[in-house]
């Protein structure tokens, strides 16, 4: 009798092997261009190099004015309800915020205040953040992980933090950051449902 490979991740029988992974990313930056959005895009590009994905990026700098005045979900316009439904139905979430006054941005928290309390149970979430220096890196553990712990989401073991020095002209330019992204995805791959390699030769996967 053969011994199962503990590193392998079977694709659920109900999931077509050809179906792309639906990845929804949220950038909590209030500005454009944005290092936070650049980090999100780099994470998505790295993931796309390993598996077939269907991705979308939600930028709060774009949609923020549409929901800042809402107090309950019923007050939201249809466009924001569609955004919330895409977050709740994603196979994988990538969430990122710049450090703002020792926390995530208010709009980032306000958006997730509208997400259904039980809509993210068991959903894999990759946590990411940006800040002026490495001194703010613990925002991932002190702010983001508790928030998604409340939702009973499955936060991936490693988050990705980037400082200003990791970017040039709003593009990721530090190879060490690219390695951290790769490591975070590799360590989290066993937690991502519907994992399916694009190629058997995908390095490290």
Image (tube, grey):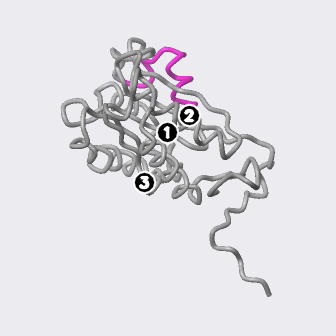
Distance from the alpha carbon under mark 3 to that under mark 2: 18 Å
Could you say which is closer to the camera, residue 176 or residue 20? 176
Q: Residue furthest top?
A: 65
Q: Residue 107 appears in which quarter of the rendering?
A: top left
Q: Residue furthest bottom?
A: 1
Task: Find disc 3 in the rendering and name its residue.
Answer: 158
> Measured from the top left, where is residue 54 in percent x and y?
67, 34
Q: Give the residue number, with chain letter if any, for mark 2.
A: 24
In this rendering, which labeled residue sits more in front, label 1 or label 3?
A: 3
Look at the image and tell me in which quarter the N terminus lies.
bottom right
In the rendering, at what x and y percent does residue 109 appear?
33, 32
Give the image location of residue 118, x and y in percent. Answer: 48, 46
Drawn side of residue 69 relative to residue 63, left or right: left
Q: Are marks 1 and 3 in contact (CB under 8 Å)?
A: no
Q: What residue lies at 48% left-to-right and 51% top-to-bottom? A: 184
Instruction: Using the image, determine if residue 121 lies above or below residue 169.
Output: below
Q: Secondary structure at mark 3?
A: loop
Mark 1, other Cα within 10 Å: few <14 / some 14–19 / many ≥20? many
| Residue 85 shown in magenta | yes
Q: Quadrant of the C terminus?
A: bottom right
Relative to 4, is 26 on the left or the right? left
Name which quarter of the figure residue 27 lies in.
top left
First of labels 3, 2 by sequence position: 2
Mark 2 surroundings: few (<14), some (14-19) or many (≥20) residues within 10 A = many
Q: Are marks 1 and 2 in contact (CB under 8 Å)?
A: yes
Q: Earlier in the sequence, mark 1 or mark 2?
A: 2
Residue under pointer 1? 94
Between 103 and 200, the one nearer to me in the picture? 200
């Amino acid at each position: 009798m053969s011994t199962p490979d503990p590193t392998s991740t079977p694709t659920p029988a109900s999931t077509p092997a050809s179906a792309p992974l639906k990845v929804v990313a949220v950038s909590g930056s209030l500005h454009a261009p944005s290092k936070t959005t650049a980090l999100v895009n780099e994470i998505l590009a790295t993931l796309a190099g390993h598996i077939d994905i269907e991705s979308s990026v939600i930028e709060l700098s774009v949609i923020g004015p549409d929901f800042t005045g809402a107090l309950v979900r019923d007050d939201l316009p249809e466009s924001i309800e569609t955004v919330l439904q895409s977050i709740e139905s994603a196979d994988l979430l990538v969430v990122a915020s710049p450090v703002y006054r020792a926390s995530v941005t208010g709009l980032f928290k306000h958006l997730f205040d509208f997400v259904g309390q039980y809509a993210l149970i068991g959903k894999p979430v990759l946590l990411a953040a940006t800040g002026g220096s490495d001194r703010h890196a613990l925002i991932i553990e002190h702010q983001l992980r508790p928030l998604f712990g409340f939702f009973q989401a499955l936060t991936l073991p490693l988050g990705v933090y980037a400082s200003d020095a990791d970017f040039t002209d709003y593009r990721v330019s530090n190879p060490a950051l690219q390695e951290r992204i790769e490591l975070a995805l590799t360590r989290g791959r066993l937690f991502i449902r519907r994992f399916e390699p694009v190629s058997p030769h995908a390095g490290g996967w």
